[in-house]
Image (cartoon, rainbow, N blue to C red):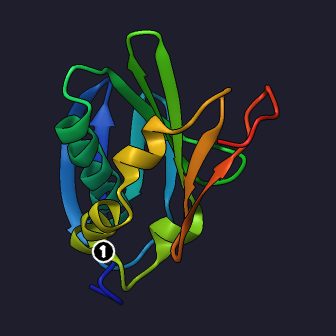
Amino acid sequence: MIGGVGFELRVTLNGEIRHSGTFEDGEGHVCSEGGLEWAVVDVTRELVVEGLRGYLRQHFANAPVTDGRDPYTGSHVVHIVEGAERWTIELTERFLDAADIGPHGAVRLFNEWNVENHVRLLSGGAKLIIDSERLWRQPGSEGRHA
């Protein structure tokens, strides 16, 4: 792997996996043509996101968690719903690309930064943004700082 970053290739035909493997080089993209679809996925990024999912499952055990990539920023956005509370966490592209963080380092940072506490302090639609060097709260639609 180059710089600790690997890629996984999955080829599906009409929804059925025809080939899956890993390789060292490539661009992150999804293509499809005539029922054939292929994707190159950055495995390291996915492991960091999975680390956040696991962390959130520990701290928000009964809360549904949904997530996905923001097509405009490249960030990964996570939504948590617990009763009437709704929270949003954004993993910036810079955080996801930080070669020295890796999946285990990311979970260590989530614990060190006490992400759970910061999430629970969010109010008024604010969002917690996790960057490679820090985290901060972005005011929500009500314009209130958490």
Q: Position of residue 79 (x, y in %)?
A: 47, 30
Relative to the observer, which residue lies in front, 53 or 111? 111
- Circle 1 SS class: helix
- x 47%, y 18%: residue: 85
Q: Looking at the image, which is closer to me, 22 or 4? A: 4
Image vertical order of residue 29 relative to residue 94, above or below: above
Q: Residue, x 28% and y 40% (percent of image)?
A: 56
Front residue (pair 103, 84)? 84
Q: Residue at x 51, y 30 (%)?
A: 87
Please state which of residues 54 and 39 is positioned toward the viewer in this rendering.
Answer: 54
Residue 140 locus on image (x, y percent): 73, 33
Quadrant of image for the C terminus: top right
Q: Is residue 46 left or right of residue 124?
A: left
**Local crowd at mark 1 within 10 Å, few (<14), some, or many (≥20)?**
many
Q: Is residue 45 above or below residue 75?
A: below
Outermost residue, right side: 143
Identity of the residue drawn at 63% across and 50% down? 137
Question: Which image quadrant for residue 13?
Answer: top left
**Quarter of the image that includes the N terminus:** bottom left
Asked whether residue 19 appears in the rendered view, the answer is yes
| Count of marks, rendered view | 1
Instruction: Tell me which corner region of the image, top left, top right, bottom left or bottom right, holds residue 41.
Output: bottom left
Q: Is residue 98 above or below residue 40?
A: below
Q: Position of residue 20 (x, y in %)?
A: 19, 52
Name the residue furthest bottom: 3
3, above or below 56, in the image: below
Name the side, left or right, on which 81 lies relative to 88.
left
Kind of residue indicated by mark 1: Gly
The answer, for residue 6, to whether it is visible in the render is no
Q: Which residue is mark 1?
A: 102
Q: Position of residue 65 (x, y in %)?
A: 35, 27
